[in-house]
Amino acid sequence: MTETKKDRPWLFRTYSGHSTAKASNELYRSNLSRGQTGLSVAFDLPTQTGYDSDHVLAKGEVGKVGVPISHLGDMRTLFDQIPLAEMNTSMTINATAPWLLSLYIAVAEEQGADTKALQGTVQNDLIKEYLSRGTYICPPKPSLRMIADVAEYCYREVPKWNPMNVCSYHLQEAGATPEQELAYALATGMAVLDELRPRVPPEDFPTVVGRISFFVNAGIRFVTEMCKMRAFVDLWDEICETRYGVADPKFRRFRYGVQVNSLGLTEQQPENNVYRILIEMLAVTLSKKARARAVQLPAWNEALGLPRPWDQQWSLRMQQIMAYETDLLEYGDLFDGNPAVDAKVDALKEGARAELANLESMGGAVASIEYMKSRLVDSNAERVNRIETNETIVVGVNKWTEAEPSPLMGEDGGIMTVDPAVEADQITRLNQWRDSRDKAAVRSALDALREAAAKNENIMPASIAAAKAGVTTGEWAEQMRVVHGEYRGPTGVSGAVSNKTEGLDEIRDAVDAVSDKLGRRLKFVIGKPGLDGHSNGAEQIAFRARDCGMDINYDGIRLTPEDIVTSAKDQSAHVVGLSILSGSHLPLVEDTMNRMREAGLADVPVVVGGIIPEEDARRLLAMGVARVYTPKDFQLNTIMMDVVALVDPQSVAAE
């Protein structure tokens, strides 16, 4: 192995944002002073789903999983004293990507920046939102058109900006196998390029191809994950050359950023997550051929709640030690010519090509959304089952569970909490902003935006004009809803029992027994109140409950407490299950419980699952919640028996 010139390290990012634009700005400037070299902005769920902070669906969600950005003033505050002309900014935003990029451009212009010099990335991947994350607004076809609008505008006006970050990260979080992650992400990239090709002169199309980037996940099986990255490099190069005729290898390069796996982080013995994060980072840094361009690492305590600044600093230091203390960047690729690696890469490529051909036969990624969603739910069910049966060992979860208490937890429970007053303060500022605007200018900007969308014109120029006029996030998104309609994606959970009923005989017998007593099938209504789109847990509960013989009702994501209570009453529910992972469990559950009592359903037990600190769990139980489940409760069969026992304690006692 011969030494080569030392490589520059990847961009060091920390995915962050919370509470308010002012608080997030202070966090960003602090992180940059500690050696972070790029920003990665986390937006709150109302911003991601196109609602202002005072919308009914935003209740309890403001500032919880990211920063609320309702208008140009918020964006100004977010980047105060941060020169955007010198910054590389990644914005994890999808349905409202055209809007948030418009606000960013407007602020950059106010700072005097040349937009042609702006560098960064907007995620802008709606297909994975339908499959896994759930922050979509409009149906797939107009959403695809808006993705292309951003890419076309950036190609002409913001040429150093990556207009789309094909995101396979959440596919793995939703249970994707490496082959599925490869195929579904590559199919998404192809769908966008197919949409873009007619809009761009043929001689410029390779440049547009070269601006498409990816955002991937790296799990704990780091040899497989490293091979997956090498497979991504080869397959994207192949697609760009053969499907799109891109001759210059520079424009065929697989450029990606990464956040390593959060799904595998454990609530139990959370200090072990530090090792998991480090091992997962190796998958995307060891192989020079397939090395990430930007890395952001979760914090050790993300299975518990919102990380504190110190926790994020610790993850940043991990990257810096790898880049500057080790000799990793001094060598060429460590795996070229390795027969085991080559064989694994070839196998992954073969599996991905087969699945890509399957998707192509269905009409491509957009036409295959329902199929892909059902496959992800099935794959995730298999993953969960392997952990339940100890086929997959997770240290501290299903093996070596005895441990000393973690001294890292501290008096604050090891996490940061967002003051509930933040929401009221944000709404006050939002109303002040509305009152201070030129209302005629706002009306004119909204009319122009709606007209551009209706005529299928590129919406970026009208969006930037609307940003400068003072339009709010909710107002922008409402025009898209008016023109294109709203969309509810497939849940991936069919009504038919699957073939995964082995080992469920005892529970099925208990469900049959209690159903006989009830005179009808035990009815379990499962809902996700609020804007949280992380539906994996709810899907797996619904999947297992169905296979155990329960009559389930699961309508997917983004429901109001009123929607869920109405469903519980109409369906004559025996048990109601709520799933919330965004940290908004207290206000949403309290609202739901009050509405249950008002609807005469006080005797119907309610169970709640999510990332819920112990103190919050106690408060939920005091509200009347029957059971609280967190990630440590991974045995789904135990939860199923709890549901049966809540309906008829005698039936379970007799088992």
Image: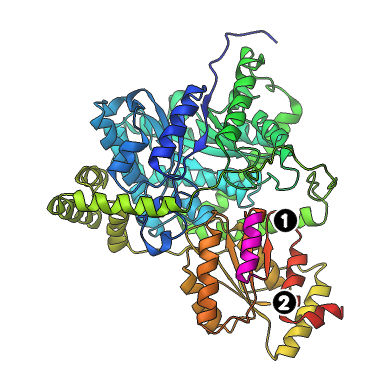
Q: Is residue 305 visible?
A: yes
In the image, what residue occupies the spot 64% across and 55% down? 615
**Residue at point 32%, 29% (across, down):** 159
How dense is the environment of label 1, judged by Cα within 10 Å: few (below 14), some, or many (20 and up)? some
Q: Is residue 151 magenta?
A: no
Q: Residue at x 61, y 15 (%)?
A: 324
The answer to whether residue 152 is seen in the rendering is: no
Question: Element under label 1?
Answer: helix
Q: Are marks 2 and 1 in contact (CB under 8 Å)?
A: no
Task: Please determine whether, in this image, residue 505 is positioned above or below residue 326.
Answer: below
Helix, strand or loop at mark 2: helix
Using the image, tell me which numbered label, if any, was put on residue 646.
2
Is 617 a magenta residue? yes
From this view, report whether residue 468 is shown above or below residue 607: above
- Name the residue rendered at 65%, 45% in the picture: 413
- Quadrant into which the C terminus falls: bottom right
Q: Is residue 265 left or right of residue 166?
A: right
Q: Nearer the viewer, mark 2 or mark 1?
A: 2
Q: Which amino acid type is shown beneath numbered disc 2?
A: Leu
Which span is picked out in magenta? 615-625
* In-front residue for pair 651/602: 602
Name the amino acid type tagged 1. Val
Q: Is 444 in front, or is 142?
A: 444
